[in-house]
Image (spheres, coloured by chain):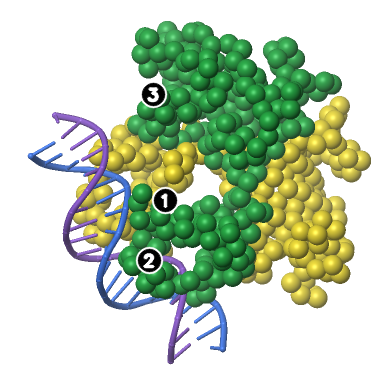
Chain colours: A yellow, B green, C purple, D blue
Amino acid sequence: MKLHEKIYFELKEKIESGTYPVGSLLPSEHELVANFQVSRETIRKALRNLLEHGYIQKKQGKGSIVLDVKRYNFPVSGLVSFKELQAKQAIPSRTIVVKNERVKAPKHLVEAGLVTEDEEMILLVRQREINGEVIILDKDYIKCLSKEMHLPNEQMAISLYDYLEGDIGLLIAYAKKEFNVEPITKEDCELMALGQDTHVVVVRSEVFLEDTSFIQYSESRHRLDKFKFVDFARRQHA
Amino acid sequence: MKLHEKIYFELKEKIESGTYPVGSLLPSEHELVANFQVSRETIRKALRNLLEHGYIQKKQGKGSIVLDVKRYNFPVSGLVSFKELQAKQAIPSRTIVVKNERVKAPKHLVEAGLVTEDEEMILLVRQREINGEVIILDKDYIKCLSKEMHLPNEQMAISLYDYLEGDIGLLIAYAKKEFNVEPITKEDCELMALGQDTHVVVVRSEVFLEDTSFIQYSESRHRLDKFKFVDFARRQHA
DNA sequence: TAGTGGTCTAGACCACGAC
DNA sequence: TCGTGGTCTAGACCACTAC
């Protein structure tokens, strides 16, 4: 564990436990330098991390003010998998793998230059059940990194990202996401518990690895009444 | 202008203009130090800024890879005002101020501890027209910072944030936002061009100043077919 | 092995806030 | 005035990538 990470986690823990109460000031950077016996830049890196995650607000001439974490830190933003979300929220859920097969790359990905024309991809379709109802339908196209590559159904029922990052050792770096509300398709009707709904929320993502190579395109289709997206945003004054 | 900002803007400009083509490597940090005649930490701060805004991907042992800005940098995320959005997209639009009056603070804000019970706030309701249709309905509750405070209608038709930041000199720092899809209200029907729609996208925000004091609560109600939210997200491996 | 970015140090000076 | 965070410097050593 890096020094600045250790300091970040220690301060984060003290904020979450109330050792540093909401609205109070953290010890000054100078004091933290003395306490942790590290250089000021190392302290500042830890504080920057706290700032970016919504734990503190810094003010020149004053100090680092502790924010109300419970209010601002239900992060559904960023790049987080369904499994990681569920783990945080402790909701009874289940995943059913509907499709897991090789297909030709969809045309719009070829046109976007993300894959070559005759390339094969793995199409993965999964139902996400919460309290016994299918609330989310996930459709993923994953680039084949080798001829033999396949995705074990048992793993896909847990987490695609756990498999790609843990078992295969890929490093997922960033994604472009797009949120829309669209009319339902026949597939939505068949695979989701929609009732009278006429629309679903569609989250489309293009996902890339650390070397900037394309790895995954996904469409996550959500029932309107269960969709919620929470974000913590900082204003850019540049 | 700070040094690292100047370097950030110069590199950003060269990426956007294609001087550094997509997929190529930026000059190494060592080279940039020599070119700009600054210390390495200053270069690194500029590069960190490019990374956070989706312009580059860094890889240890390799370098800084230029990403496809056109594809990833339509930022509707962050904390951006309607006026700033319109400016980027050059769409003919108009804002109509429907209400601008003092009211008692709404109960849910009192319960959340954001305002005191008998406090007055300014209620601002604005229609956002695009191509002659009301697509968005913005309802804002703004905290009264003085007895005399009022918001000029002419300014509100341009930008609330321009007024608060420019004219009054407030510094908006961060916000918590929540996205939901909800059934329409009577007010939506009356003030928006909804057609057969039964739902709208609702974006609720709590906005805070640099000293962490609460300043604004807002509800932005969007017609389903015109709502779109684009995000660039990095995976947290910590 | 050579070159890259990642981490860390020990200073300096400046701008802002509270008193 | 004093203490705070913001910017910047000039080094050091380490981990990873490419060859």
In the displayed structure, A37 sits above or below A235; it is below
Q: Quadrant of residue A92?
A: top right
In the displayed structure, B54 sits above or below B201; it is below
Q: Residue at x 36, y 13 (%)?
A: B146
Q: Which residue is mark 2?
A: B36
Q: Nearer the viewer, mark 3 or mark 2?
A: 2
Residue B221 locus on image (x, y percent): 66, 24
Q: Nearer the viewer, mark 3 or mark 1?
A: 3
Q: CA distance from mark 3 to mark 2?
A: 37 Å
Q: In this orientation, which residue lies closer to the viewer: A164 or B180?
A: B180
Q: Which residue is mark 1?
A: A49
Q: Residue at x 38, y 9 (%)?
A: B148
Q: Which residue is mark 3?
A: B168
Q: Residue at x 57, y 31 (%)?
A: B83
Amino acid type, label 1: Asn
Task: Count neighbours of disc 1 (C-alpha within 10 A) and say few if under 14, some if 14 to 19, many if 20 or more.
Answer: some
Q: Quadrant of residue B157?
A: top right
Horizontal side of B77 relative to A198 (left or right) equals: left
